[in-house]
Amino acid sequence: TPDHVVEWLKSKKIEIVPVGFKDTMALGCNVMSFGNDRVLAPAASKDLIGKLRANGFTVYDPDMSMFTMMGGGIHCMAQSLRRAAG
């Protein structure tokens, strides 16, 4: 990640969680946020999942191996929903 991007994120008080090569290659950074500190992350990204949980996140971690072996990730399976308030 370019230095200027890292500095911008830090200036916004966004904590950066280091992700190792193995988790990166397992599309570990391809997570989905559900809000309220809940995320969906691929089960193969064990180190990242541990770091997220250590930072207070609830992590749902399905086996995504059949999708990631073809280059797909969690966002590839996502569809936006519009919900009425209330």
Image: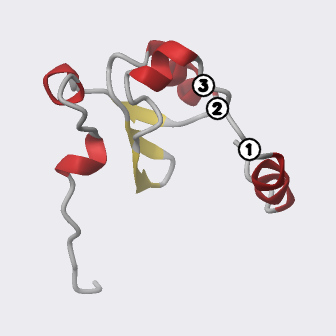
- The residue carrying mark 3 is 19
- Type of residue at label 2? Asn
Which quarter of the image is occupied by the N terminus? top right
Q: Is residue 8 above or below residue 73?
A: below
Sequence-earlier tag: 3 or 2: 3
In the rendered structure, find residue 15 and report the number of the disc placed on it. 1
Residue 64 located left or right of residue 48: left
- The residue carrying mark 2 is 55
- Badge 3 element: loop
Is the residue marked by circle 1 packed among few (<14), some (14-19), or many (20+) residues within 10 Å? Answer: few
Tell me the distance, in whole angstroms, between the alpha carbons under discs 1 and 2.
Answer: 10 Å
Q: Is residue 78 above or below residue 25?
A: below
Q: Quadrant of residue 42?
A: top left
Which quarter of the image is occupied by the C terminus? bottom left
- Type of residue at label 3? Val
- Type of residue at label 1? Glu
Q: Residue at x 22, y 79 (%)?
A: 83
